[in-house]
């Protein structure tokens, strides 16, 4: 039996000496003398290492030579009180098995101080570093917090399709899913690709959002949420864009825009509080190494009520601020990150929710206001990153929605099922979307979105 009943996290947390156990992990460092070796062992369950003390005379010399940085080993021994500082217990090894060696000449993580850019080139190994061990543990805890928040509040988790025939945003930047011969596809009489002969019988793509299908479930189960992968074929190589990323999208029947804002604010506060409570050591490490104000920034979200203003009010504040912006501010133009951060960090000094955007810059499914100019949209702005959540009250009126669909040049037949939801038992409803990696950037303090996901998918890059 290879599976150990113990983890480094559990052993260090209990601090209980006098027990003989077996523990598995990867060697972080090995140092020592002719008499004794000190091995720092980590199994990924926590930031700290368990110190293994190996009496050189008790082990074969060739075995000890195989224990190098990166090697995977199993150790059986007695836990004793540690005379050194930094840990309450250490292990006196009585038996060591080497599962896998790591050649010191070729293992790329032998030395410390590698740049994040270098580690992206060896993304298959970077989870073994302190930085990415912390990030991926925090990613787990954040995902768990998301599921727990919604479950505890009566939401149902639904799995919306990854392959879809609809474009939720109308942007057209989607990855096509097809089995047709790329060099010689079947054509229609007018020379277009005949997707009727494709696997699904129509043009299909990877989803950009689960929202529209989430609304189907909300019209039956009242409160639902999706949490799954989404895809954008946007040729962007910025530190804020991925081609494959994860989205959290709740949809709630019988919720208006105010209800929507209340849920979103509570949700974000809960997630940030959960990270501070359950990832203290990892957060402190990332603060020390990457973002000196990380804890302060997280606490900022918890301590300050979210300020709610309309888009029109936001534009007035920005125009009267005296601040010089790279992008001009005018009513009808979308707010840029610099505008959003000014509102949060300098003007209100609190998270901000901006509502009632111009209809011309928002999606077709957002409920139209009576003024004929704005829609019941809302964006939540955070320090450091700007927009973190985008949502709206959805347009539940069939005639108005149909008008918006036609207005934006979308073929109504492509969304017949979505429109039909408004014909049979329609109800007021709302929802929002949150990019999981965007929230990960905020809670970790990392600067590049490629560093908060296991295998970043970007233009010209789809390794392993």
Image (spheres, rainbow, N blue to C red):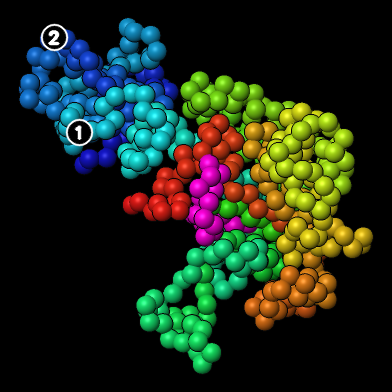
Pointer 2: what residue? 35
Question: What is the x, y in percent for residue 131?
Answer: 43, 30
Pointer 1: what residue? 106
Which residue: 33% across, 43% down?
A: 124
Which residue: 44% across, 80% down?
A: 199
Snapshot quadrant of residue 343:
top right
Which residue: 77% across, 43% down?
A: 328
Residue 454 appears in the picture as rendered: yes
Work out whether residue 59 or residue 348 is closer to the camera in this orientation and state it: 348
The stretch drawn in magenta includes residue 233: yes
Bin the neighbour count of mark 1 within 10 Å (Cα to Cα): few under 14, some 14-19, many 20 and up.
few
460 is higher (above) or lower (below) than 149: below
Work out whether residue 292 or residue 251 is closer to the camera in this orientation and state it: 292
Q: Name the element at disc 1.
A: loop
CB of mark 2 within 8 Å of CB of mark 1?
no
Q: Name the element at disc 2.
A: loop
In this rendering, position of residue 156 left or right of residue 377: left
Q: In the image, which disc is placed on residue 156?
A: none
Residue 223 appears in the picture as rendered: no
217 is higher (above) or lower (below) than 18: below
Bin the neighbour count of mark 2 within 10 Å (Cα to Cα): few under 14, some 14-19, many 20 and up.
few
Furthest residue toward bottom: 189
Question: What is the x, y in percent for residue 327?
Answer: 72, 42
149 is higher (above) or lower (below) than 54: below
In this rendering, position of residue 350 left or right of residue 209: right
Which residue: 66% across, 44% down?
A: 388
Q: Which residues are magenta?
A: 225-245
The stretch drawn in magenta includes residue 249: no
């Amino acid at each position: 039996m290879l599976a150990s009943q113990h983890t480094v996290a559990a052993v260090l947390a209990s601090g209980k000496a006098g027990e003989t156990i077996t523990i598995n992990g990867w060697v972080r460092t090995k140092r020592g003398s002719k008499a004794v070796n000190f091995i720092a062992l980590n199994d990924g369950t926590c930031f700290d290492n368990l110190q293994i003390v190996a009496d050189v005379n008790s082990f074969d010399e060739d075995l000890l030579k195989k224990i190098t940085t990166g090697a995977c080993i199993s150790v059986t021994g007695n836990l004793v009180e540690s005379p050194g500082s930094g840990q309450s217990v250490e292990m006196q090894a009585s038996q060591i098995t080497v599962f896998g060696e790591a050649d010191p000449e070729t293992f790329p993580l032998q030395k410390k101080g590698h740049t994040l850019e270098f580690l992206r080139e060896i993304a298959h190994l970077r989870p073994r570093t302190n930085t990415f061990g912390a990030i991926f543990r925090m990613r787990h805890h954040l995902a768990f917090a998301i599921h727990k928040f919604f479950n505890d509040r009566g939401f149902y988790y639904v799995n919306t399709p990854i392959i879809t025939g609809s474009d939720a945003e109308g942007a057209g930047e989607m990855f096509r899913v097809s089995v047709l011969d790329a060099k010689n596809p079947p054509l229609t009489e007018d020379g277009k690709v005949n997707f009727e002969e494709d696997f699904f019988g129509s043009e299909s793509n990877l989803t950009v959002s689960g929202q529209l299908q989430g609304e189907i479930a909300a019209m039956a189960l009242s409160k639902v949420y999706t949490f799954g992968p989404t895809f954008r074929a946007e040729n962007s190589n910025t530190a804020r864009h991925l081609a494959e990323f994860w989205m959290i999208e709740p949809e709630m029947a019988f919720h208006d825009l105010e209800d929507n804002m209340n849920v979103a604010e509570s949700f974000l506060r809960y997630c940030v509080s959960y990270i501070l409570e359950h990832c203290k050591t990892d957060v402190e490490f990332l603060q020390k190494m990457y973002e000196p104000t990380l804890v302060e920034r997280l606490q900022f979200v918890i301590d300050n009520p979210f300020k709610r203003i309309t888009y029109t009010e936001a534009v007035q504040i920005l125009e009267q601020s005296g601040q010089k912006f790279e992008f001009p501010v005018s009513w009808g133009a979308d707010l840029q990150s610099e505008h959003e951060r000014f509102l949060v960090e300098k003007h209100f000094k609190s998270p901000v929710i901006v509502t009632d955007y111009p209809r011309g810059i928002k999606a077709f499914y957002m409920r139209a206001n009576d003024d004929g100019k704005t829609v019941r949209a809302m964006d939540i702005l955070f320090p450091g990153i700007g927009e973190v959540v985008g949502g709206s009250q959805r347009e539940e009126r069939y005639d108005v929605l149909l008008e918006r669909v036609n207005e934006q040049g979308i073929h109504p037949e492509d969304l017949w099922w979505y429109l039909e939801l408004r014909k049979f038992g329609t109800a007021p409803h709302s929802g929002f979307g949150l990019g999981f990696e965007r929230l990960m950037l905020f809670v970790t303090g990392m600067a590049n979105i490629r560093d908060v996901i296991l295998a970043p998918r970007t233009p010209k890059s789809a390794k392993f």
